Amino acid sequence: MSSLIPVTTSKVSSHLPLLDLLPESGGLSWVRGGQGVVGWGEYAKTTVKGPNRFREARQWWAEQLATFNVVNTLNVSGTGPIVFTSFSFDENEESVLVIPQVVVGTRSGVSWMTWIGDKAQPYLPKKAPDLNPAEFAWADGSLTPNEWMSRVATAKGEIEIGELEKVVLARDLVAVADRTIDIRPILNNLSEQYPSTYVFAVDNLVGATPELLLRLTRGMVTSRVLAGTISKTGDDEKDLALAASLARSSKDLEEHEYAVRSVADALEPFCTSTNVPESPFVLHLANVMHLATDVTGALIESKIDVDAFSLLSRLHPSAAVCGTPTHLASQVISSIEGMSRGRYAGPVGWIDAQGDGELGIALRCGQVTDTTIRIFAGCGIVSGSDPEKELQESNAKFAPMRSALE
């Protein structure tokens, strides 16, 4: 037992919001409405890629856990050792797993710290850091707006002549800063402006996603599907009318149904029962409204090898970020999208020692590299899509990251 590495979880009292605890570099985050987990200090890190990446990630995490002696008296989700994960959209690009040295979490009024090693409990800062946000200059990404609209038209043509029903096309923008980028002001702005989203940071991929791909807690699984979007005007009366039009839009309802069906079909083999509401609700965010459906299920108890990793391998990529049928949509994305997505539109979040966890889809996000950040947005293209309207929708989806930077 003495050769095992101590991992200790203890209750703490901190008067600072979770994001204010993060250090200048290497911060990890999964926070929504002030609750969640943050981490820092890199205890261990690995990358995986290829068709078996979820299995390899699970195996690496199990190997790390086997070296720990865990002391955790709190019966709260997210306590004990956790690994932050950020998987690429494409299996052939690198996915990242990071085990932080220190984790601080808050849930249901309970705050805790988990730390690895035999040193004394780390001190938490007493005051928020003084932050100095960078200034940014913007440039086109991999494609100009006109080039991207041409790709949308091409995708629409593919849908009209073949078996493809929907394909998600993404685009990017690049911002160059006047100094090395500190992700903390970005996270704080996102949290303040979009409190109902999951504000995340893993290996310098930062963002605020409204889409919960997977929450697994004690055998209960939840996935929130978002597909179908309309921009808000800021006028409450007009926005109510727009919400009603979104809920009736045949184009958006068709796109949403594909996405819900892909998630329900992925979860069904693992569950004794699933609940799929007959019609979506309209989720109101600060800048846009989405059609949303919460798919829930109870895992089959006899399937002892089912955990967040195995569910992710079935859930990703969903129709919400790829298309329908998935294999055809993936081929079209590879041939016409014209850029590398990296870890945009891949699963991001955390997984604990029991295989439970919370993971979203990395949307409304950007990848930071020194003085540059590359931000992303994607749109679901179906037979009724109009390239110019899709461009407008992509610009609305850029808004959270643009406003967080500006």
Image (cartoon, rainbow, N blue to C red):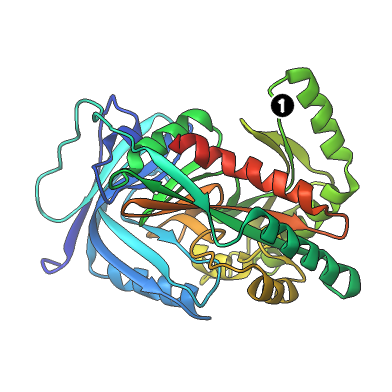
Q: Quadrant of residue 156?
A: bottom right
315 shown above or below 385: below
Q: Residue at x 69, y 69 (%)?
A: 269
Q: Residue at x 69, y 56 (%)?
A: 146
Q: Residue at x 49, y 62 (%)?
A: 343
Q: Quadrant of the C terminus?
A: top left
Q: Is residue 315 visible?
A: yes
**Tally of numbered tags:** 1
66 shown above or below 172: below
Amino acid type shown at disc 1 = Thr
Q: Nearer the viewer, residue 118 or 403?
A: 403
Q: Could you tell me residue 135's position as x and y percent? A: 37, 37
Q: Is residue 217 visible?
A: no
Q: Nearer the viewer, residue 339 or 124?
A: 339
Q: Quadrant of the N terminus?
A: bottom left
Q: Could you tell me residue 202's position as x and y percent? A: 38, 54
Image position of 157 (left or right of 392): right
338 shown above or below 100: below
Q: Quadrant of residue 258?
A: bottom right
Q: Could you tell me residue 365's position as x and y percent? A: 50, 49
Q: Residue at x 30, y 38 (%)?
A: 112
Secondary element type, mark 1:
loop
Mark 1 lies on residue: 233
Q: Nearer the viewer, residue 221 or 38?
A: 38
140 shown above or below 242: below
Image position of 200 (left or right of 361): left
